């Protein structure tokens, strides 16, 4: 490489791999590596053993490799192996290495041929290897055996894809020569994740097992299914008979070299074939790949180190059992809890939620949307109200015929309406209490490092809130009782008997004065559009005081429909079994179609809170909820048959207008006093309690040292953060010492394979690697290095489209290797060998 620093790149990645494996996946770094992929019995294990020169991998039928094996080869003067899971133990007997791999595999996966993505890290030191890191993955299988699950093929594919989808991973695709290359499982997987062949290196095994008269020359010369790197390397492994006979690997490598030198189809490329050549190519390719990915790798390390700096500084020098530290931290935690609670209620600082309404904002919506909505829901139906008034007037007159409208009827009806306010008021208190408890839990999340402190804090504050609940409800009910105790008909806003007849006209006038004011905007789904017309669809809705309109999107340019609010009401719709949305509908009280041919307009929201909020907004626009009357049949019949005389009708109308006027005063007063009462008795009181009393109650609750015992998860987190921070720091220091100024030859342009095969071609590709090479009559062989005829379609196969891919731009800071070559550059059709 011409740079001593570059020779240290692979050992550097090995160190990082060990460091990050020992602390788990917290760093989430994609280290440069080579993944070995192939079908069962493709010869992967033999290739790896030839690299090491030792028999050390498990053998047998079915799936033998059932966990990824991270194999780190390190050039050294002596020969031994060691595992990451048993550090310090050196294995000089490679039979023991095999037994350890089998035992460690069974420990995680069991002995039932199951698989696991948890890797085994093996480091082999030897004078016969070049620095190299490979990951041996389970062979791709088709049929489950033993107790394997039926989806074993998909599980293995998913495991392989976890590695080879990463851009930092080179793919060593191992394919036997005595099978059709176009059906190679390894190349198919590589094609899926690396369509341009930029990261794929091909290995062709079992060349000595091909049928007589056939060869794999077209494959090895990168003509059939070409790879962008131009790397197809043939190897000859030991046969099963050689393995069983314990044939020496050195003798096998000698036999491999003799095979290539003596074979008529391969002797011209013998120097570019064989296991030693493959090992050198992988060393060069991995070193170059590490150099290419090093800048991005360094940036990722730096960003992760920066993210951990503050947390690691807090943990450094941390002494869990120091009493003074526990006391100080208890004070800090309680103070922080108090500040966070107040910020969530007041809506300030770092406690502002950007995802959903919470804390003070949620309580504000309860006060000014949910509570008024609950008040309106309690109002009596108009027919029911008039019937009650008529009965009250008649019962008050008794046996007499009344000449005047009795004020006692007005008072009886008003008191009955005021009593109904108790339900919404108590419900308002309940909703606020629930939100306060939720806020306490959200603020206590910062105490999760100390489980007992968090539990005690939540218990003490929640108990205080529950204690204040009864007082708040008593005070709220007292407000209602105060309203019942005296009906003030001299109130300045009360219309009085003289003006009662003019009530309806004034109401209409006040409603019309609202104009076309926008009340609310937002997304809603129209649920009852027929499937023939596209089904349920989402639109942007705009609600004003007079209409409900919806648009295609929030730019409000394309209006889809405008619905006047006259005679509209809201009704709840039961949530369907298949739908996750919450639905309500709008209908016309005069039984007219609301939207095109639909009697109702069904609108859907993501949550019930959104439904209630929209119903509250519609209420402000005068669209009230439907009243469901539950009246016995006898009463209904009596009502239907009951007919008031004109004089009684006038009295009923007068009382009705008086009740309306007075209840408007009461509602206004209650809507004003309820938030004030709850704020004083509940919210402000809880804030004062947390500030002044929480710490004292925590001290009286029990042992403070026990309160400040940290959780096991926190101790693990602290240890993990410190180890990760140290590993990242060391990694950056190591990378900083590596010079990356060495430059190499840029990657060749895309291989032009369009002249090989296809209709109209003078030469057809072999249907499989086993087919013999033939020439059509009259065809003359092209001279070596001559450019092929252009514009010919390429062969079918996993890498058919590589020739049509755009040329990858050459990377900067690259130059020829340290020993310059005087040979001319390769032709565009003949790939330069690696």
Image: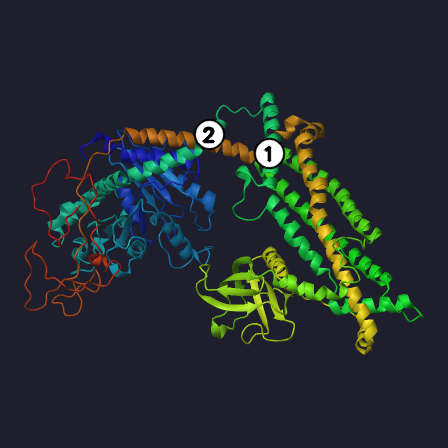
Q: Position of residue 747 (x, y in %)?
A: 19, 46
Relative to 323, say whether 539 is above or below.
below
Residue 427 appears in view: no
What secondary structure is found at the residue carrying circle 1? Answer: helix
How many numbered discs, if any? 2
Residue located beneath label 1 in the image:
339
Q: Position of residue 154 (x, y in %)?
A: 41, 56
Q: Which mark is residue 793?
A: none
Mark 1 touching mark 2, by CB under 8 A? no
Relative to 690, say whether 495 is above or below.
below
Please indicate whether residue 616 sits to the left or right of residue 241 in the image.
right
Q: Position of residue 749 (x, y in %)?
A: 17, 51
Q: Position of residue 206 (x, y in %)?
A: 24, 53
What secondary structure is found at the residue carrying circle 2? Answer: helix
Crowd tier of the residue under label 1, counting other residues whose Cα lies within 10 Å: few below 14, some 14–19, many 20 or above: some
The answer to which of 509 and 582 lies nearer the viewer is: 509
Residue ID at (21%, 48%): 809
Q: Earlier in the sequence, mark 1 or mark 2?
A: 2
Please indicate whether residue 808 sits to the left or right of residue 55 in the image.
left
Residue ID at (17%, 33%): 2
Residue located beneath label 2 in the image:
312
Please indicate whether residue 5 sits to the left or right of residue 486 in the image.
left
């Amino acid at each position: 490489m011409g740079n001593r620093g570059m020779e240290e790149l692979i050992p550097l990645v090995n160190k990082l791999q060990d460091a990050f494996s020992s602390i788990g996946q917290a760093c989430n770094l994609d280290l440069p590596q080579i993944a070995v992929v192939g079908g069962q019995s493709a010869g992967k294990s033999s290739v790896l053993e030839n690299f090491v020169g030792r028999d050390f991998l498990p053998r047998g039928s079915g799936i033998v490799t059932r966990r990824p094996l991270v194999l780190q080869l390190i050039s050294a003067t002596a020969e031994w192996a060691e595992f990451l899971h048993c550090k310090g133990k050196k294995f000089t007997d490679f039979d023991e290495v095999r037994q350890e791999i089998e035992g460690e595999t069974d420990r995680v996966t069991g002995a039932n041929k199951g698989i696991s993505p948890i890797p085994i890290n093996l480091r082999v030191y030897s004078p016969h290897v070049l620095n190299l890191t490979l990951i041996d993955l389970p062979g791709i299988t088709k049929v489950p055996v033993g107790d394997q699950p039926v989806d074993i093929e998909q599980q293995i594919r998913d495991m392989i894809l976890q590695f080879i989808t990463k851009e930092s991973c080179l793919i060593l695709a191992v394919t036997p020569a005595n099978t059709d290359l176009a059906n190679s499982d390894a190349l198919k997987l590589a094609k899926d994740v690396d369509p341009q062949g930029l990261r794929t290196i091909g290995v062709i095994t079992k060349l000595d097992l091909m049928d007589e008269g056939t060869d794999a020359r077209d494959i090895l010369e990168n003509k059939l299914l070409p790879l962008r790197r131009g790397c197809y390397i043939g190897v000859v492994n030991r046969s099963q008979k050689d393995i069983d006979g314990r044939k020496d690997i050195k003798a096998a490598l000698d036999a491999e070299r003799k095979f290539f030198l003596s074979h008529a189809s391969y002797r011209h490329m013998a120097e570019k074939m064989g296991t030693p050549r493959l090992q050198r190519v992988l060393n060069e390719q991995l070193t170059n790949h590490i150099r290419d990915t090093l800048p991005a790798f360094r940036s990722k390390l730096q960003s992760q180190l920066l993210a951990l700096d503050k947390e690691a500084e807090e943990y450094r020098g941390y002494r869990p059992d120091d009493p003074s530290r526990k006391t100080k931290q208890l004070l800090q935690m309680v103070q922080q809890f108090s500040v966070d609670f107040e910020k969530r209620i007041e809506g300030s600082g770092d406690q502002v939620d950007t995802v959903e309404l919470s804390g003070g904002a949620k309580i504000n919506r309860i006060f000014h949307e949910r509570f008024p909505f609950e008040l309106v829901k309690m109002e009596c139906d108009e027919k029911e109200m008039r019937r009650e008034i008529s009965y009250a007037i008649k019962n008050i007159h008794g046996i007499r015929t009344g000449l005047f409208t009795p004020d006692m009827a007005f008072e009886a009806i008003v008191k009955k309406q005021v009593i109904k306010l108790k339900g919404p008021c108590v419900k308002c208190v309940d909703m606020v209490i629930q939100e306060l408890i939720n806020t306490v839990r959200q603020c206590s999340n910062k105490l999760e490092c100390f489980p007992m402190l968090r539990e005690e804090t939540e218990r003490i504050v929640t108990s205080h809130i529950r204690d204040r609940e009864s007082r708040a409800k008593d005070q709220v009910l007292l407000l209602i009782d105060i309203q019942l105790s005296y009906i003030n008909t001299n109130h300045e806003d009360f219309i009085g008997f003289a003006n009662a007849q003019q009530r309806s006209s004034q109401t209409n006038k006040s409603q019309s004065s609202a104009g076309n004011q926008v009340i609310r905007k937002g997304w809603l789904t129209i649920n009852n559009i027929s499937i023939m017309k596209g089904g349920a669809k989402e639109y942007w809705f705009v609600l004003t005081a007079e209409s409900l309109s919806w648009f295609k999107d929030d730019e409000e340019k394309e209006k889809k429909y405008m619905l006047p609010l006259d005679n509209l009401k809201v009704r709840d719709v039961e949530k369907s079994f298949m739908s996750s949305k919450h639905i309500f509908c709008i209908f016309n009280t005069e039984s007219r179609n609301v939207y095109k041919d639909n009697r109702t307009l069904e609108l859907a929201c993501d949550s019930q809170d959104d439904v209630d909020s929209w119903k509250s907004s519609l209420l402000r626009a005068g669209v009230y909820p439907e009243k469901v009357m539950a009246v016995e049949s006898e009463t209904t019949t009596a009502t239907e048959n009951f007919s008031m005389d004109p004089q009684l009708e006038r009295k009923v109308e007068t009382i009705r207008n008086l009740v309306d006027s007075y209840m408007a005063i009461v509602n206004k007063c209650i809507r004003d006093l309820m938030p004030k009462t709850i704020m004083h008795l509940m919210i402000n009181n809880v804030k004062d309690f947390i500030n002044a009393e929480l710490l004292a109650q925590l001290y009286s609750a029990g042992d403070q040292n026990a309160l400040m015992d940290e959780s096991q998860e926190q101790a693990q987190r602290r240890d993990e953060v410190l180890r990760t921070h140290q590993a990242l720091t060391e990694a950056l220091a190591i990378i900083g010492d590596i010079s990356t100024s060495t430059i190499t030859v840029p990657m060749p342009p895309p291989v032009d394979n369009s002249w090989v095969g296809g209709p109209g071609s003078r030469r057809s590709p072999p249907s499989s690697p086993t087919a013999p090479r033939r020439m059509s009559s009259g065809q003359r062989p092209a001279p070596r290095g001559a450019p092929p005829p252009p514009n010919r379609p390429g062969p079918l196969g996993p890498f058919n489209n590589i020739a049509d891919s755009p040329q990858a731009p050459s990377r900067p800071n690259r130059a020829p290797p340290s020993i310059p070559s005087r040979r001319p550059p390769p032709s565009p059709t003949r790939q330069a060998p690696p």
